[in-house]
Image (cartoon, rainbow, N blue to C red):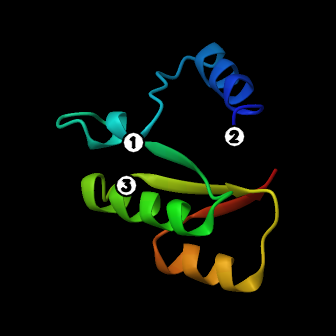
Amino acid sequence: DADIQPLITRILEDAGYAVAQGLDAVAEPGTRVDVALVDASNDTVGLCTLDLVRQQHPEAAIVLMAGAFGAPLVRAAEAHGTVLTLQK
């Protein structure tokens, strides 16, 4: 989400983390991903992103963020390897 992304980026960088944004960063060979914050504003895109992260970086913790969560999205996210869901 364009409104919250700069804030999260600044908080993480101020805490000493390197931040890469976008699917290109996740798909880049050799990139280390410890935690992936995935916006699930669009359920289909969010779940596809979860799958890509899980395939490329099986060791990464995945945090799913969305404006609203319903039980089906939470169950699907957990099935895709999400470790935490956060409501924006």
Using a 10 Å C-alpha cutoff, classify the residue at mark 3 as few (fewer than 14 neighbours), some (14 to 19) or many (20 or more): many
Using a 10 Å C-alpha cutoff, classify the residue at mark 1 as few (fewer than 14 neighbours), some (14 to 19) or many (20 or more): few
Where residue 48 appears, as percent x and y from the top left, is: 43, 64
Looking at the rendered image, the quarter that the N terminus falls into is top right
Pick whichever of labels 3 and 1 is earlier in the sequence: 1
* Horizontal relation, residue 35 to residue 58: left or right: right
What label sits on residue 23 in the rendered view? 1
Pick whichever of labels 2 and 3 is earlier in the sequence: 2
Residue receiving disc 3: 53
Q: Amino acid at mark 1?
A: Leu
Where residue 73 appears, as percent x and y from the top left, is: 66, 77
- Quadrant of the rendered image containing residue 76: bottom right
The residues tagged by marks 3 and 1 sit, at their Cα atoms, a distance apart of: 9 Å
* Horizontal relation, residue 16 to residue 18: left or right: right
Residue receiving disc 2: 1
- Quadrant of the rendered image containing residue 55: bottom left
Using a 10 Å C-alpha cutoff, classify the residue at mark 2 as few (fewer than 14 neighbours), some (14 to 19) or many (20 or more): few
